[in-house]
Image (spheres, rainbow, N blue to C red):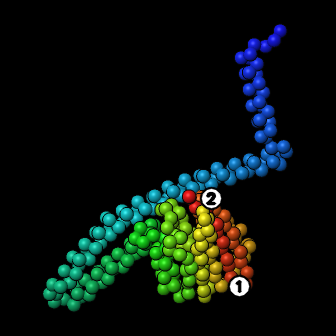
């Protein structure tokens, strides 16, 4: 007795799907484990990417609140203080007190701008990634007395906000680590775009990072850099020698 045609077609389709699934399965346990590891890594990177976006949005929100509310309040108080200092005061102690209050207000405004800038680099919004990196380089030289060179083309660094912020943070964290640990005299930051990939290299001539330092659980700076790179599906390698430390990063860019 022959099978009805609709049932035969259905049976053949089911058999074909089973065969495809069997063919798609890894041939060995090792391949299965490798596939599982790749899936876990992809899931972790997707999670890191989402969390980093949330963190950056929160930083930008707090920075705006600080600038718009607290910043304006402090600026208004300093204007009032300036007007008060112009009034005739016979008591020398009162004049000194007013002058001291004005100086502390100025310090508070400066600190507020620095904190807001760390939360959300204002230079990124003003002039884009290249301008922001130049500002970061100049600030690093002024604060630490270490020569810092930026090599890159402005037209190659016109990126969306997510990538611009990530690259800025990576360079910022690298310079912070150099200032704290490297004892370097020169730093060179190179950015080169080739088709849909951005190549970022950060080199210094300091004491060189040791392998043990890279593996320390307390190396939060290195861990943060790796997480930022992985969150945007990039690759990072860090090497150290007696001639200094070299960080090489490859970032795939959106088309």
Q: CA distance from mark 1 to mark 2?
A: 30 Å
Q: In the picture shown, does residue 58 fall above or below 15?
A: below
Residue 144 location in percent, x, y? 53, 85
For the residue labelled by badge 2, is the local secondary structure a helix, a strand or a loop? loop
Q: Residue at x 76, y 36 (%)?
A: 21
Q: Quadrant of the N terminus?
A: top right
Total marks placed: 2
Q: Nearer the viewer, residue 52 or 22?
A: 22
Q: Is residue 207 visible?
A: yes
Residue 180: x and y in percent read 59, 79
Front-lying residue, 224 or 14? 14
Residue 176 seen: no
Mark 1: few, some, or many residues within 10 Å (few <14, many ≥20)? some
Write down the quadrant of residue 64 in the picture. bottom left
Q: Name the residue tied to disc 1.
A: 243
Q: Around disc 2, counting alpha carbons within 10 Å, would you say few (fewer than 14), some (14 to 19), or many (20 or more)?
A: some
Give residue 170's position: percent from left, percent from top.
57, 69
* Residue at the disc numbered 2: 233
Between label 1 and label 2, give the one nearer the viewer. 2
Is residue 47 found left or right of 58 in the rendered image?
right
Label 1: state its secondary structure: loop
Residue that sits furthest to the top in the current view: 1
Q: Earlier in the sequence, mark 1 or mark 2?
A: 2
Q: Nearer the viewer, residue 41 or 157?
A: 157
Q: Which mark is residue 66?
A: none
Q: From the viewer's perspective, is 130 left or right of 79?
A: right
> x and y percent of residue 160 in the render?
49, 62
Question: Looking at the image, which residue is at 77% across and 50% down?
Answer: 34
Q: Are marks 1 and 2 in contact (CB under 8 Å)?
A: no
């Amino acid at each position: 007795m022959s099978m009805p045609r609709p049932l035969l077609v259905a049976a053949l389709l089911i058999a074909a799907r089973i065969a495809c699934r069997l063919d798609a399965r890894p041939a060995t346990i090792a391949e299965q484990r490798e596939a599982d590891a790749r899936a876990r890594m992809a899931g972790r990177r997707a999670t890191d990417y989402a969390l980093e976006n949330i963190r950056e949005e929160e930083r930008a929100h707090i920075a705006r609140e600080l600038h718009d509310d607290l910043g304006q309040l402090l600026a208004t108080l300093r204007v009032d203080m300036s007007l008060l200092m112009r009034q005739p005061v016979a008591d020398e102690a009162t004049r000194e007190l007013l002058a001291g209050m004005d100086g502390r207000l100025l310090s508070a405004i400066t600190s507020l701008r620095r904190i807001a800038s760390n939360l959300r680099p204002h230079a990124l919004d003003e002039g884009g990634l290249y301008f922001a990196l130049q500002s970061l380089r100049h600030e690093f030289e002024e604060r630490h007395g270490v020569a810092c060179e930026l090599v890159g083309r402005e037209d190659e660094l016109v990126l969306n906000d997510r990538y611009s912020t990530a690259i800025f943070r990576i360079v910022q964290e690298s310079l912070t680590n150099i200032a704290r640990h490297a004892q370097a005299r020169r730093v060179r930051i190179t950015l080169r775009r080739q088709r849909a990939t951005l190549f970022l290299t950060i080199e210094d001539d300091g004491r060189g990072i040791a392998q043990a330092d890279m593996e320390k659980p307390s190396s939060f700076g290195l861990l943060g850099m790796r997480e930022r790179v992985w969150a945007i599906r990039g690759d990072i390698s860090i090497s150290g020698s007696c001639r200094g430390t070299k960080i090489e990063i490859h970032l795939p860019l959106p088309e």
